[in-house]
């Protein structure tokens, strides 16, 4: 059997050392569409090394890969055709802000394998730590067509939760350049689906598609820039389900709704500094600041294809420093 769920789940973590610096961060930011207009101070914080802030979704490519999809296919018990594989979803939890440069240990293992009958779903969890402790945890959900049917647990429902009925608090439109996938793949995702027309056709697409994680990163940038005052350190958790493909050259519509949903834990990363009153700050032991935080619900669609869904079940949870 191409997928042996028991063997995949029993395999020990794959541990690798990763390192990155400002050049990797800048390349990633350019790959998700940052830097336009090139001289805009709000964009320079993503592109100029002397002002550099790290968008948390950089964590998905830090160290140059392999990213979640390829990583999930590199474990014992999994031997499948890459053309049958789709990235189903991504969840990233930040324990501390991602530094501009760093060295860390990344431990990855399959933590769930679900049998959907006509397909299999693998969940690959990666825990990243440095000398200061945990940095981030990310989980990639990998959908493999034609590999179910072994009688395993079906897992959570894939049913999409509709976006709020109310008008969005903010709407942004993002243009995807024709060469966006070619630039983004330089951060470590070399899947030919995003560059090779023949491979894309074999996978059932009319032409190469944009990386889901490129859309994922660009969407987080829209939320941070629009509703979080450009402060990347406020992001605590970011999850999304990939509901449809994006073709380079299209325009994406990003709709955002504020929510009172609290962030997990709600703890600040630092014990000082001002916290806006709207954050609901309360004193905690040791002089630290705790805040209620909040969340942003997001829906992303392709404008050129009658607002076809691209990202669904998307939530950004945030707090204050």
Image (cartoon, rainbow, N blue to C red):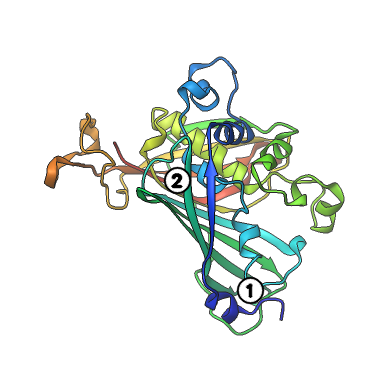
In this picture, residue 194 sits left or right of residue 29: right
Give the residue at x 57% y 33%. Answer: 29
Give the residue at x 12% y 47%. Answer: 285
- The answer to whether one can see residue 247 in this image is yes
- SS state under label 1: loop
In this picture, residue 259 sits left or right of residue 168: left
Which residue, as the protein is rendered here, is positioned at the far top? 39
Which residue, as the protein is rendered here, is positioned at the far bottom? 151
Of 17 and 212, nearer the camera is 17
- SS state under label 2: loop
Task: Residue 10 in the image: state x and y as whole percent.
Answer: 53, 78
Q: Residues within 10 Å of mark 2 (few under 14, many from 20)?
A: few
The circle drawn on residue 173 is: none
Q: Is residue 211 above or below residue 48?
A: below
Indicate which label's residue lies in the foreground, 1 or 2.
Answer: 1
Q: Is residue 30 above or below residue 18?
A: above
Give the residue at x 59% y 79%. Answer: 7
Q: Is residue 48 above or below residue 59?
A: above
- The answer to whether one can see residue 299 in this image is no
Pointer 1 residue:
76
Of 180 and 124, nearer the camera is 124
Distance of label 1 from label 2 (alpha carbons)? 45 Å
**Image quadrant for the C terminus?**
top left
């Amino acid at each position: 059997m191409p997928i042996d769920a028991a063997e995949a789940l029993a395999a020990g973590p794959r541990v690798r050392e990763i390192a990155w610096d400002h050049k990797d961060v800048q390349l990633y930011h350019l790959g998700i569409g940052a830097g336009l207009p090139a001289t805009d101070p709000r964009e320079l914080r993503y592109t100029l090394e002397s002002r550099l802030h790290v968008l948390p979704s950089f964590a998905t490519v830090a160290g140059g890969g392999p990213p979640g999809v390829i990583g999930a296919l590199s474990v014992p018990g999994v031997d499948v055709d890459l053309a049958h594989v789709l990235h189903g979803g991504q969840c990233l939890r930040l324990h501390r802000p991602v530094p501009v440069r760093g060295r860390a240990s990344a431990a990855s293992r399959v933590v769930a394998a679900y049998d959907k009958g006509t397909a299999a779903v693998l969940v690959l969890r990666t825990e990243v730590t440095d000398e200061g402790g945990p940095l981030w945890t990310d989980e990639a959900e990998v959908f493999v067509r034609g590999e179910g049917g072994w009688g395993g647990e079906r897992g959570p429902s894939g049913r999409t939760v509709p976006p709020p009925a109310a008008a969005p608090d903010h709407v942004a439109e993002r243009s995807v350049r024709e060469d966006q996938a070619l630039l983004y793949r330089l951060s470590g995702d070399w899947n030919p689906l995003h560059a090779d027309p023949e491979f894309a056709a074999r996978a059932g697409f009319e032409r190469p598609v944009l990386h889901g994680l490129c859309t994922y990163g660009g969407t987080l940038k829209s939320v941070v820039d629009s509703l979080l005052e450009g402060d990347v350190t406020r992001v605590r958790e970011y999850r999304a389900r990939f509901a449809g493909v994006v073709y380079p050259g299209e325009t994406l519509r990003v709709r955002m709704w504020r929510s009172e949903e609290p962030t997990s834990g709600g703890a600040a990363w630092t014990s000082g500094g001002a916290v806006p009153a709207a954050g609901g700050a309360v004193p905690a032991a040791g002089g630290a600041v705790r805040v209620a935080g909040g969340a942003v619900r997001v829906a992303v669609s392709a404008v050129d294809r009658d607002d076809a869904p691209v990202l669904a079940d998307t939530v950004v949870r945030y707090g204050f420093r």
